[in-house]
Image (cartoon, rainbow, N blue to C red):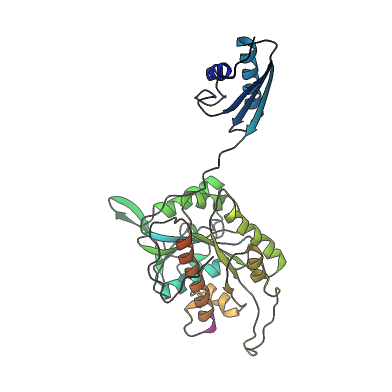
Amino acid sequence: MKLDRKDILKALESISVAGEGKNMVESGAVKNVMTFGDEVVVDLVLTTPAMHIKKRAEDDIRKLIHDQFSAEAVVKVNIKVEVPEKNEIKGQPIPGISNIIAVASGKGGVGKSTTTANLAVTLAKMGFKVGVLDADIYGPSMPIMFDVETEKPISIEVDGKSKMKPIESYEIKLLSIGFFTSPSQAVIWRGPMAAKALNQMIFDAAWGDLDFMLIDLPPGTGDIHLSIMQSLPITGAVVVSTPQQVALADARKGVAMFQSESINVPVLGIIENMAYFTPEELPNNKYYIFGKEGAKNLADDLQVPFLGEVPLVQSIREAGDFGRPAALQTASPLEKVYEDIARNVVSEVVSRNEHLPPTEAIKITTMAGCSAVKKN
């Protein structure tokens, strides 16, 4: 019996790939059918690498040709797997919030929360409306740093719905799990419980209009990070690291997480914290206790912006413990340090919104003296 390509192609419309509603011709799985005497070659493209689905498709094709055309036919099925691109993890925008910045670190103890607090108050001093979400569920520190440890958010009605009103301090709107637990109480939650609490603080709160929401993430690259990425369209991420190698190795992983294909959040840059120590009695001396320019070199290596360096200064720690971030120290060197970093962050956000698809419809329209960094 002569094997005809068109007849075989027509017959293949009677079978389908497991898990798909359409037949394999209509779905586009069959890319080509060729006949050479008593030989039939079928090129098949599947969207799943599952072995049992590939085996069943091959067996179904072979059986159909043997039953309907020739039992002696030599059937060869070439299977190629093309897995469709996964949808990027994107979240739901919050009306009124223009830009959401995740502040992260691969390693704990590098000053990420301190940097977030000082960046927030600096942005507020520059004229922006700022909110901070303390997403470090297991180690919330923002209530202490903003001197509101004993405060409790109240419930207000917005458009007929009950919403949490964020605590306000130094013109910053703030929510943290620390407001709902006692200082001595450990939060012993599994990932889903923590994610639910975060979603409540994100979507059941009356944030109002914000130019920036800063999210203080916990250290590492785990469940809380993914929950945030799935809940919110993050405008960009800032990674904080100290200069030593053990911190830089984890910071590299933090950058890799945001740049991974499934998350794909732009990295606005890296901040080097505890960059050097200058004694008060020797203001011109710099001692590189944790190494010199490690985070700056990492930024160059990863081809992400370097946003600036913060010195190791006792008053930064004291200010955080006292509940008044060091960036509020008017006309001090630390005020200038955080201003420079904040301007770089804002410039990178503007540049990101100009050159990449926006995650929010609203873009920054006032720069408060900042200029955008032009990228190639």
Q: Is residue 186 magenta?
A: no
Quadrant the N terminus occupies? top right
Question: Number of numbered discs present?
Answer: 0
Nearer to me, 342 or 278: 342
Q: Residue at x 47, y 78 (%)?
A: 328
Quarter of image, res 297: bottom right
Place of residue 221 in the rendered image (x, y in percent of width and height, measured from the top left): 61, 54
The majority secondary structure of the magenta stretch comes to: loop
| Residue 348 visible, this orientation | yes
Picture coordinates of residue 51, whole percent (x, y): 66, 28
Can you say whether 172 is above or below 11 in the image? Answer: below
Answer above or below: position of 305 versus 28. Answer: below
In the depicted view, which residue is nearer to us: 162 or 207?
Answer: 207
Q: Which corner quadrant of the image does residue 61 belong to? A: top right
Question: In the displayed structure, does residue 81 sit left or right of residue 358?
Answer: right
Q: Residue at position x 51%, y 28% from top?
A: 27
Q: Where is residue 233 shown, x and y percent of the image?
A: 46, 53
Look at the image and give the residue range highlighted in magenta.
Answer: 330-334
Q: Is 332 one of the magenta-colored residues?
A: yes
Query: What residue occupies the far bottom of the structure in this picture?
Result: 281
Q: Residue at x 41, y 56 (%)?
A: 360
Q: Looking at the image, is 287 positioned above or below residue 108? A: below
Above or below, 203 against 300 in this view is above
> Front-most of 318 and 228?
228
Tell whether 318 sits left or right of 205. right
Q: Which quarter shows the C terminus?
A: bottom right
Q: Give the residue drawn at x 65%, y 80%.
A: 277
Q: Position of residue 293 (x, y in %)?
A: 67, 74
Q: Nearer the viewer, residue 87 or 253?
A: 87
- Residue farthest toward the left in the current orientation of the protein: 160
Q: Is residue 220 visible?
A: no
